Amino acid sequence: MKYKTILFILLPITLFANSLVKVKLSSQEELLGLLKSGYDIIHYDKKSNEALIYTRNPDKLKMKFTYVIKDTKAWWDKSPFKKDFGPYYTYEEAVSELDKLHNLYPNIIGQKFSIGTTYEGRNIWAIEATHFDGNEDARPAVLYEACIHAREPGGVSTLFGFLWYLVRNYGKDPDVTEVLNSRRLYFIPVVNPDGYVYNESSDGYWRKNKRDNDNDGIFEESDDGVDLNRNFSYQWGYDDTGSSPDPSSATYRGPAPFSEPESESIRDFTDSIQPKVAIDYHTYSNLLMFPWGYDNIEAEDDATLRAFARRLTASNGYAIGRPGELLYNANGVTMDWWYSDSSHPKILAYTAEVGEDFWQPDTSIILEQINENIPLNMLLAKMAGMWLAIENNDADSLNSVTHSVRIENLSATSQFTGGNVSIITDSLMRYGITDATPSSFNISNLGILPNKNDTFFSFTFTLPDTFEPGWIAMYFNVSSPYYNATKEVKLIIGNINPIFQCDFENGFSDFMTNHWDTTSEDYHSQYHSITDSKGGNYNDNDTSYLEFKDTLYLQDTTAMYYISFYTKYSLEKGYDYAYFQVKTIGDTTWQTLKTFNDTADWHKVTIDLTKYRGKLLKYRFYMETDQSVNFDGIYVDDITFKKIPEFHSPEGIREHTNLKQQTNYINTLILTSSKTKNTDIKVFDITGRLALQRNVTLHKGENRLTFNQLTPGRYIIKIGKRTLKLLIEK
């Protein structure tokens, strides 16, 4: 009966349609006045001082405005989102997706569970991602949530995209595997189900929950609903600008802290899992924010929050800062309560604003938003506990004898106060490399950002007399009283000639562009480079590109592929961006692999393309600017593309034996011997650890050896002086 009444009440809405309008503000104070008056500020650009406002009565603004959407309901009814939210998840589809993930990957995705019910009785579903091996309860927790504001489906897609990335790469990608083996990741894709479902039949712009504020039994947009992200207790009602006491306002904070079942459920669940790190996904504006929200003042851990924010946004280029620095203050928000150390230990908390609009119909844009936030979400997980990263420090040197690796503490919660990193030297034997000196390195202390959190470990190889240059996989064992892990690092040994290189001295016939051009104004190597804005600064509201005409064929599925270039840029910080992007043939989505913003002098950038091997790949440099402030732009020079084969030496692997198992375990290896003899057999896993050892008698002729104990995987088998590579598959 209630819903029939609602339909009747809402029928006259076409006479008083909601609109989306743009206004040009004269000052920050004018914005604060609009917020205090309860206007629904959809988006605010601090640089241009322009705001988008969702309102039923734009004439009451008493300022000049232009319509962006005159009738949002009419727009919605004609939009691709009217039916099942188009490319976005509806609430029911999100619930089904949680079930699907668990059913397909029950060992790393738990069953969905409800953390509470909403005002209208819907479940607020959550899911846990970890390796369920009986040891998960001791692991630090990370909380990812989205859609506390009902009109923001981009956050839902971002979380599901990350979940699919995790399950598809567990057991394949070392970082994903370690994350799920050492963390508990919790996901709440839809915090506000009532409002989210309501948007299916409204105009897509409802923000709050569905509380009947005046208890008249009728839901009316003009008077009902609470902004759940103003309903948390820390600094609740701090002022009437960062939240509103008026039930008709879009930022109505509710009658009391945690008055809403949805925010109460988040509170209780957070306190039960006590996460170390948490993020609240919103849309839109391409921002990453951290406390405090209630006032534009530094939190106790501002330096750490800011330093990690820079790292978190390295792949997506989002602007970082407190809400008051980037937009405006907001009180009673989830992020501040997480961080405030009220009913739980302090949580390092962030709020992400993804994308350029609430509803973006292009699936490729949604995929781009998912991909640009995967590194961010992975780093959040690493931050929650002890995590040492080891990476090649000589990616470009191709030094044949001496190498170094960078060892970095990525934890935001713990210093690494002492331990040892050692090379698993047995893992080098398959390359014919007999030694690495020194083989171990003691670490006394690695701090937490922004303090010094890294060190370097240099070592020298004893190489075979003859070899074919290429990459090797080295394994390092990290041991300490509180952190133990095995890390894989790819190193390049020997000089590799490039497949493609361009220094722009003879033009740029290998590329197509709308207005990039070669210049002698600045360059890395004499006497030319290429730039987006030859002869001056870039233009307002401009998009430009430099795209490679041909296709990179990453054919060899055992090789590594790198592209490198030198670049220099001067771009308005937080507003104008350049990107290095790739896409596979047949795909419409450009994936951003590197983002450039602010100012930097000439430096080399090397990008690993190995994950695209086996595919045809396009690449481009892409730049986009906004209005008013214009800088010099970006320069690119000395582009090089290299294929790095696997390192090979006749003193290393002499034979590749690929065997397909027919049952759970392979049990036979056929060897031919020229005479009868006793010999030792040692079987090593890919990290060089001894998995099996036995002494056998080989008879003249064909011999069959059984290995029932070996599970599927890659192994190195040493039979006397003979070395074989063995692949066991299901």
Image: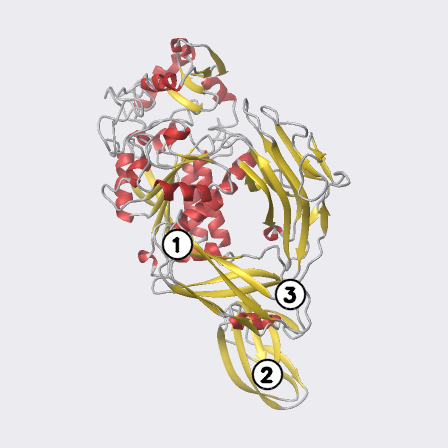
At 61% from the left edge and 76% from the top edge, which residue is drawn?
723
| Residue 402 spot, x, y in % from top left | 58, 65
Between 136 and 398, the one nearer to me in the picture: 398
Going from N to C along the chain, the mark reached first, 2 or 3, is 3
Is residue 107 visible from the viewing direction of this image?
no
Disc 1 element: loop
Please name the amino acid that badge 3 sits on: Phe
> Which residue matches tag 1?
130
**SS for tag 2?**
loop
Residues packed near mark 3 inside 10 Å, few (<14), some (14 to 19) or many (20 plus):
many
Query: Does residue 124 appear to the left or right of 565 in the view shown?
Result: left
Mark identifier at residue 647: 3
Q: Residues within 10 Å of mark 2 (few under 14, many from 20)?
A: few
Q: Is residue 192 above or below residue 241?
A: below
Whether residue 186 is visible, yes or no, is: yes
- Helix or strand or loop: what does disc 3 sit on? loop
